[in-house]
Image (cartoon, rainbow, N blue to C red):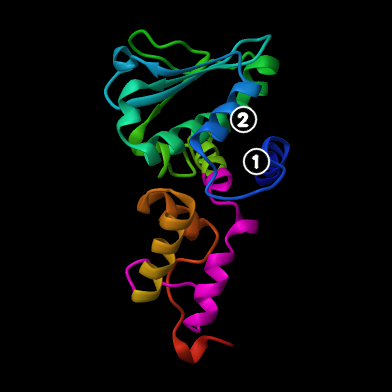
């Protein structure tokens, strides 16, 4: 679903699908589905580490705000943008249909999701809305269908099954994704783990058991 959204957007704009997707193309994709995108917001009032906010309404499209601080790092900006887009695509119905209210503190609103840097990429499945938004971010920036470079490296290195992230093969796979898709090492590592490309290596004797 998410890969198709991105591919269709790129095809509509450029007549072809190529990665890495540009930050401008990410921005125009989000702007299509939100009421407002503020990329230079001051989010310090919502607490330490908040880098993205998606605010929902019962009617109309959500509003997305990105911390001004994120713009110091291009890959970080791209990850934050696509993460918030995940909330837009997956979670708007919760607030529209169920009038969902989230627990709040300080001046936070119960109809908004506040995303911190330490959960934008590596949220656990127990924090299910953050995990889902993180999954969308990975799928948008590093679509499985377009990870041909991974298959090439696996073939060149005779890799069968998952590679440890710290092994020579694992590092080569991560580096290829970082370079080919303009993402951070952390984002590339999480995506490859989700796809089963990185993980605990199988013992050679059990490879075909």
Note whether 63 is above or below 132 in the view shown.
above
> In the displayed image of the protein, which residue is found farthest to the bottom?
205
Residue 29 - label: 2
Would you say residue 142 sits in the magenta stretch? yes
Asked if the residues shown at circle 1 and circle 2 are in contact, with their CB atoms under 8 angstroms apart, the answer is yes
Q: Where is residue 58 in the image (x, y as percent from the top left)?
A: 65, 10
Q: Position of residue 156 (x, y in %)?
A: 50, 81
Q: Mark 1 points at which residue?
A: 6
Question: Dot 1, how many residues are within 10 Å of its Cα: few (below 14), some (14-19), or many (20+)?
Answer: many
Using the rendered view, name the quadrant where residue 57 is placed.
top right
Q: Residue at x 52, y 35 (%)?
A: 82
Quarter of the picture holding the N terminus = top right
Residue 126 - label: none
Q: Residue at x 60, y 52 (%)?
A: 143
Note whether 16 is above or below 152 in the view shown.
above
Observer able to see residue 161: no
Observer able to see residue 187: yes
Quarter of the picture holding the C terminus = bottom right
Q: 33 left or right of 67?
A: right
Q: Residue at x 41, y 55 (%)?
A: 178
Q: Give the range drawn in magenta.
A: 138-167
> In the displayed image of the protein, which residue is found farthest to the left?
48
Question: Dot 2, how many residues are within 10 Å of its Cα: few (below 14), some (14-19), or many (20+)?
Answer: some
């Amino acid at each position: 679903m998410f890969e198709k959204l991105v591919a269709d957007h790129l095809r509509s704009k450029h007549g072809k699908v190529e990665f890495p997707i540009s930050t401008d193309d990410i921005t125009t994709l989000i702007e299509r589905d939100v009421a407002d995108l503020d990329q230079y917001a001051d989010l310090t009032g919502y607490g330490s580490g908040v880098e993205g906010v998606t605010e929902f309404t019962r009617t109309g499209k959500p509003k997305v705000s990105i911390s001004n601080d994120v713009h110091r790092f291009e890959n970080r900006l791209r990850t934050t943008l696509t993460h918030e887009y995940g909330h837009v695509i997956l979670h708007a119905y919760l607030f529209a249909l169920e009038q969902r209210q989230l627990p709040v503190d300080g001046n936070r609103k119960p109809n908004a999701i506040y995303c911190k840097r330490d959960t934008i990429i590596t949220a656990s499945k127990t924090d299910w809305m953050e995990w889902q938004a993180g999954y969308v971010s990975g799928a948008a920036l590093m679509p499985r269908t377009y990870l041909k470079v991974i298959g090439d490296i696996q073939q060149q290195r005779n890799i069968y099954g998952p590679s440890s992230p710290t092994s020579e093969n694992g590092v080569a796979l991560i580096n290829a994704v970082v370079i080919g898709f303009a993402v951070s090492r952390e984002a590339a590592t999480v995506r490859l783990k989700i796809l089963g490309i990185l993980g605990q290596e199988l013992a050679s004797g059990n490879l075909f058991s």
